[in-house]
Amino acid sequence: MNGHEPRGQDPRAPNLDPRELAADPFLHLAGRLVPGGHVLPVRVYYEDTDFSGIVYHANYLKFMERARSDHLRLIGVVQGDLFGEALAEAPGFAFVVRAMQLDFLRPARIDDVLEIHTSPVEVAGASITLLQKVMRRGELLIEGRVKVAFVSQGRARRIPDSLRAAMRAAQGEAPSI
């Protein structure tokens, strides 16, 4: 990905020199790795709510997207390097949400602190399926399954090996959260 070979660091982070990760003064904003995945805390602000003071349904998608991105960051996938590698292997590539199934169980309100849990479920040839849960103080609010596919020039393509390895390592750590 970035020309670095793994140097004996955590096997979940084969693509990022630990010094680069440690040098990020805002890394704490990316949440934390937990057995089986990642947790990202998100505070609900006024802008996240609708006229009734509850979180507008589409904003959960933003929260979940942030969690997926920060999960990658913490398992050592440098997204800029990944995009550079992918561009070389597959011109015109994109990661696209192929499928998403969401169950809205309870609402969140302004000033709530939510935890977005992300857990890899399946790493296939051209796609990754993740389980995501939006929690408030242990209460399940939203549960979703998200399938993200890697495409190039309108066709599914094999996910770059470095991302596949990082996601499989994260997937194999523990049961789903």
Image (cartoon, rainbow, N blue to C red):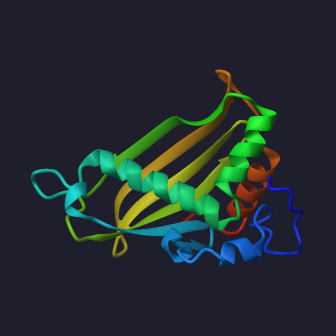
In depth, the one of 63 and 90 nearer the eye is 90
In the picture, residue 58 is in which quadrant? top left
**Quadrant where the C terminus is found in the figure:** bottom right
Find the residue positioned furthest to the left.
52
- Residue for point 55% across, 62% down: 70
In depth, the one of 3 and 155 nearer the eye is 3
- Residue for point 76% across, 50% down: 164
Q: Is residue 175 visible?
A: no
Total marks placed: 0
Q: Is residue 60 above or below residue 124?
A: below
Q: Is residue 75 above or below residue 28?
A: above
In depth, the one of 55 and 66 nearer the eye is 66
In the picture, residue 156 is in which quadrant? top right
In the picture, residue 114 is in which quadrant? bottom left
- Residue for point 59% across, 74% down: 34
Point out residue 111 in the picture as x, y percentages from the top left corner.
22, 71
